[in-house]
Every structure is written in C-alpha cells, then in structure tokens.
Image: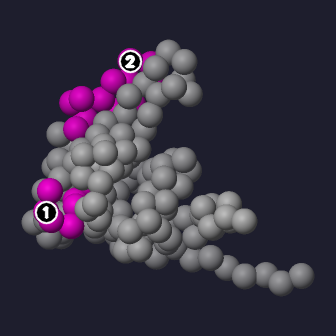
C-alpha cells in the first residue's frame, strides 16, 4: 500500500475590505443574484457570479423544485448560462454567496465542483473560486483542481 495526501490551499480574508475591487464587485453580483433565487422549500438562497475573460459577468441563483432532484444549484445555473450565452469565452473566476448566517463561507456541492472542473479542463485555464459571506470572512481558492483534486475526467470515457 502507498499513502499520499491531497492538499487544498485556501486564502482566508477577514473581511471584504481586504479584497480587490474586482473581487468585491463579483461578490456583489453574486449577492444581487440572491434576489432571483427560487427556494420555497429550503429557504436557503445561493447566488453565484462568473467573471469572463473579457470582463463580462454572468450570474445565477439556485432554483428549487418540489421534486428535489429537478432543481439546480446557483453555480450550475451560472456556468450553464455562461456556456450558452458566451460559448467561446473562458471563465476566470466565480463568486458564491448565501444570505444565511454561517460560521464559514458557503462551499459548492460535489455536483457543482464536478461541473466547474469540467469547464476548467475544457478551457485549460484555472478558475478562481471566491467563497463569500457578506460582511464576514472570505475564502479564495486559485483553481477548481484545488477544491476537487480527484475529479472525474471525460478522458476516461474515450476508447
């Protein structure tokens, strides 16, 4: 047997004040997206905003459904919207937030991590992840590979 470690590097900022204006703006876009969340069952609203290589932004919010598996997380709404509206533009960063008071910034679910990994692989450029909580600490991760080092790859499906 051989044992190895996988390490995720996270930058923690005590508040939004420590971030660049660009990161603050992306968090604001994610926060604004909370208003469009459809979460009548969980009441857990999530907003996401993407920064594209040309400076454009695309936002998304979680969309629930009474048949729970039919809903979609904010991150996937934003990523799929960007892919359909801006198919040839790379994503440089994503900010994710919620209105809930949590001890730590919200992190994407496993399904969203896998989707984000697919886009990072497709564009062959890292996507910065900004996990925010308005007025509180912020986590920044420099690549989806940091957040999901053992991702499932489409390369495995090729014969």
Judge whether residue 119 can be spotted in this image: yes
Q: Is residue 131 left or right of residue 4?
A: left
Residue 55 magenta-highlighted: yes
Residue 78 magenta-highlighted: no
Seen at 83% across and 84% down, the residue is: 2
Quadrant of the image containing the C terminus: bottom right
Which residue position is annotated with label 2?
Answer: 40
Q: Which mark is residue 86?
A: none
Which residue is at the front of the view, 16 or 41?
41
- Evaluate if marks 2 and 1 touch, with contact meaning CB atoms under 8 Å apart: no
The answer to which of marks 2 and 1 sits earlier in the sequence is: 2
| Distance from the alpha carbon under mark 2 to that under mark 1 | 33 Å
Q: Position of residue 108 (x, y in %)?
A: 46, 50
Q: Position of residue 144 (x, y in %)?
A: 45, 66
Identify the element where label 2 is drawn.
loop
Identify the element where label 1 is drawn.
loop
Seen at 21% across and 67% down, the residue is: 53
Quadrant of the image containing the N terminus: bottom right
Vertically, is 85 above or below 147? above
Residue at the outermost front position: 159
Which residue is at the front of the view, 155 or 18?
155
Q: Is residue 109 left or right of residue 126?
A: right
In the picture, residue 131 is in which quadrant? Answer: bottom left
Q: Position of residue 87 (x, y in %)?
A: 29, 54
Vertically, is 128 above or below 135? below
Q: Position of residue 102 (x, y in %)?
A: 39, 45
Which residue position is annotated with label 1?
Answer: 55
In the picture, residue 78 is in which quadrant? Answer: top left
Q: Which residues are magenta?
A: 33-56
């Amino acid at each position: 047997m051989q044992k190895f470690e996988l390490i995720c590097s996270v930058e923690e900022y005590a508040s939004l004040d420590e971030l660049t204006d660009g990161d603050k703006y992306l968090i604001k876009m994610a926060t604004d997206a909370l208003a469009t969340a459809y979460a009548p069952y969980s009441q857990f609203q999530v907003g996401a905003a993407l920064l594209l290589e040309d400076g454009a932004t695309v936002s998304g919010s979680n969309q629930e459904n009474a048949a729970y598996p039919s809903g979609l997380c904010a991150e996937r709404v934003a990523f799929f919207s960007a892919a359909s509206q801006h198919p040839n533009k790379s994503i440089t960063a994503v900010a994710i937030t919620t209105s809930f008071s949590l001890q730590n910034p919200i992190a994407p679910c496993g399904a969203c991590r896998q989707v984000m990994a697919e886009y990072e692989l497709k564009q062959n450029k890292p996507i910065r992840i900004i996990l925010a909580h308005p007025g509180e600490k912020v986590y920044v991760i420099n690549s989806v590979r940091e957040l999901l080092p053992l991702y499932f790859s489409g390369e495995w499906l090729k014969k």
